[in-house]
Image (cartoon, rainbow, N blue to C red):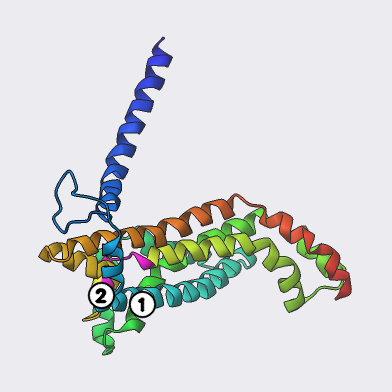
Amino acid sequence: MEGRLARIGLRIWVGGVLLFLFVPIGIICFYAFNSSNVQSWPIHGLSVKWFSVAWHDPQVRAAFLLSLRAAIFATVVALLLGSAAAFGVHRFRFFGREAVSLLLVLPLSLPGIITGIALNSAFNFAGIGLSLLTIIIGHATFCIVVVYNNVLARLRRVSGSVNEAAADLGAHGLFLFRTVTLPMLSTAVISGALLAFALSFDEVIVTTFTAGAQNTLPLWVFGAIRLGQDLPEVNVVVVGVLLLTVVPVIAAARLTGGGGITRGSAAGPRISGG
């Protein structure tokens, strides 16, 4: 009896937490279709006109393009550096190996405001003006962690005998990496890239200290809410940001549940041609 009551209580608690988290988001998404610019309940009617208004707003489009560029470049940097770091930590044994892992994970565990202030101070000390480049560097500091963790976890799951067997069949160097290693890591790399893009696109705190006078989309939303202006457009932009962050996360979750190792083993028959 007590076990049954505990399960019921736990389900009620979980349901309450989920409602607390997602009901406000649902309300904002619903207000995006409000025909009036007055945020009142009940809404006056349903309309999609604010989507067109937001899209044709030059400030929103400029902020969107800046956020998109920063997220894409930060993701590319994170892919290159995060994957390289994962390979180095996994394949080689050297002094300070665990310290390297700690330093790579640290930016994600630190509060964003600390990372932002530290980066801002470093840029000022080096005489580097705040620009798109500084935004990319700031975002890459925590995006690298996502790619690093994904690739390292997949490398630890892959048996070393696969590479040894491929080498016995004549695969070496770049050909071994392209036909065996990369297919086995493909889902981990793609999911890491998707998560890195999602993290970068909606980042606010670090961007505040690295963007200078530039406005990314999350910063535009923050400023519009603070000033109480263009609230219907804010609702529309929030819906767009949700889609561009939630969709990659869902895709990454599905990919990490896939069979990267199976795909890698399927590349085996092609090795004999090398």
Cα gap from disc 1 to disc 2, whole angstroms: 12 Å
Viewport quadrant of the N terminus: top left
Q: Residue at x 26, y 69 (%)?
A: 53
The magenta segment is: 201-207
Nearer-the-camera pick, 160 or 23: 23
Residue with the mark numbered 1: 65
Query: What residue is shown at x 61% (from left), y 63% (from top)?
Result: 90
From the image, which quarter does the C terminus lie in?
bottom right
Amino acid under disc 1: Leu
Q: Position of residue 10 (x, y in %)?
A: 37, 26
Can residue 15 be found in the magenta stretch? Answer: no
The disc, 1 or 2, on the residue closer to the chain's N-terminal end is: 2
Across and down, in percent, residue 140 comes to 41, 72
Residue 156 shows in the view: yes
Q: Which residue is mark 2?
A: 57
Q: Amino acid at mark 2?
A: Asp
Q: Is disc 2 placed on a helix, strand or loop? A: loop
Left or right of residue 165: residue 129: left
Location of residue 9 with respect to 150 vertically, above or below: above
**Residue 3 x %, y %:** 42, 15
